[in-house]
Image (cartoon, helix red, strand yellow):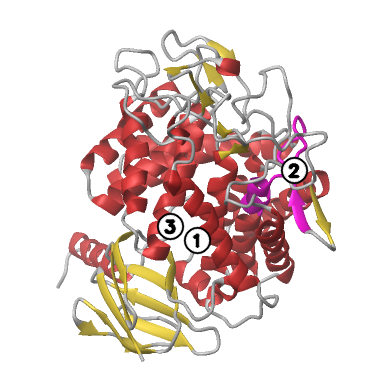
Amino acid sequence: MLTSAALILSWTMAATTQTPQTIDPPAADNSPLAFFLRAAEPRKAPEGLDAAVGETLMRAVRFLLKDVGIENNAIRDEQGRKVPPYLYHAVIDDNDHFSYRMSYPAFHHPYLIEAFLNYYNYTGDAEGIRRARQLADWTIEHSTPADWKWPHLPWSTFTEGKAGGFEDKDNLQPDKVGYAGLSYTRLYEVTGDAKYLEAARRAADTLVAQQGFDGAWPFRVNPQTGKVERQYTAALFFNVAFLEKMYSLTGNKDYKNAQLTAWMWMHRNPIRTGNWSGLYEDIPSSAESQVHYSPLQTIRLLLRYRTPANESSYLSKAKKLFDDTMDGLAFDDPEMGLMVREQTYYLAATPSATMNWSMMAAEFFLATGEEKYRYTTLQAVRMVAKHGLKPDGRSHNTVLGGRIYGDAGSWYSLTSPIVRYLYGDMGCLPEIAPSGETHLLRTSTQVRQIAYGEREVTYRTLENSVDLLKLKSAPSSVMAGGTPLKESRKLDRPNTFYYNSASKVLLVRHQNPDVTVTLR
């Protein structure tokens, strides 16, 4: 007869081996099977949108990979070497020079890391992983010194190749640490390189040590002296998500406590008051600019953290945030599609703001099944595919003409979301992914290796994963670890697959990380 301790251990081990992992925060998935099964259902997309989405994503990627302007006046690294311009410049001029001499590493580099890793999943091109690692390695190397008050953190601003400057001056923004940290943990799981986990751990330890008693972190702080330049920011969501991830990787309850304390602060403050100011690096501290980005990421966490105990409260808050932000910063134009304005201080309708919003709306649809959220995504994607990019694949700054807000030059941070979130949208709504092609579009873990062939795709994830692929033809076999998987419409057992012939979507639930899908 098993003792109580043995029963608990047996149950824990069974749960660990039987339950698929949940997608990393801040994604809205709180049940990977339910989200994947809904995503696989057949639905019609507007005619031609699937082809336009695939081409738009690849146009943006091709621009980023070309390092346009690298031979011009782009800043070199400390050794005088040419590096991708986006390391030191947030903006490229229309003439491919760089009059804008600032970059925003803590926020924009994770944007690009996520874009390049999504590109790798989509194509199997290892250049995506190389570029992602280059960005992370640079950001880690240029973090704050170990003996400062706020050590091991990425700088939110670099000017002329040096830390700080512009509106941040000698300060950095702790709310961006979580996004950088999530890019480190993703790279750790993709590559297995422990240096990324160590960088994430050091950053998380600083967040825990410097968290206020109320659960918040300041918006701008001098990392050397600890002097706070501005306290309030609503943008704690990435730190909440990052600390959740760090707890799952380490079991350190200090991370769990900091996560939950910050989350409760968000409920008592921006979720209750509607003050969503404090986010962008180039905005003065005196500005009370209300932004689109903080509400949308908070919506994802509200959906993620739903339980039977808080379902009605969290869902109603998420819906109210969605409607309030749509009313204040978005417009669904019958001809152009949905356009989202970035913030009240800079009311440009940007492709990136629109794509950010589309990704959240797609997850909202998977969480609720309500068609208005799917419609929102389709309208946003339609707009960006038609109006978002300049001829060579770089992003417009605004899609409503440059007379007021300017469309000269192009922000890398407006181009990378085209890759990040079109990929995410396709994983939620595979009907907008290109027909007649094969792509892995969504996984509950991470893709460590993938290779696409004419009649076969082979890939490796982490263990206990659920994956979604859109196939150009039906599969003849699906194997994990060399063993054929059984078909199961509900994926209610490990080591099963389900192929929906109407949507051409394949779902694979597997314990062994190595998967081979052979097509007919």
Q: Name the residue under label 3.
A: 119
Under tag 3, what secondary structure?
Answer: helix
Marks 2 and 1, how far apart at CA? 29 Å
Mark linked to residue 147: none
C-beta proximity under 8 Å, tags 2 and 1:
no
Left or right relative to 196: residue 2? left
Foreground mark, 1 or 3? 3
Of marks 1 and 3, which one's residue comes earlier in the chain? 1
Report how many numbered discs are placed on residues in the image.
3
Task: Tell me: 131 left or right of 359.
Answer: left
CB atoms of marks 1 and 3 within 8 Å: no
Q: Name the residue under label 1.
A: 30
Could you give the CA–CA distance between mark 1 and mark 3, rounded to whole angstroms? Answer: 25 Å
- 3D distance between C-alphas at marks 3 and 2: 26 Å
Is residue 509 in the magenta section?
no
Q: What element carries label 2?
A: loop
What amino acid type is highlighted by mark number 2?
Arg
Lateral position of residue 344 relative to residue 198, left or right: right
Q: Which amino acid does label 3 sit on?
A: Tyr
* Image-quadrant location for residue 366: bottom right
Q: What element carries label 1?
A: loop
Q: Which of 377 and 70 is in front in this view?
A: 70
Question: What range is drawn magenta here?
Answer: 337-357
Could you tell me residue 464's position as x and y percent? Answer: 30, 67
User: Which residue matches tag 2?
Assistant: 341
Q: Nearer the viewer, residue 160 or 240?
A: 160
Pick whichever of labels 2 and 1 is earlier in the sequence: 1
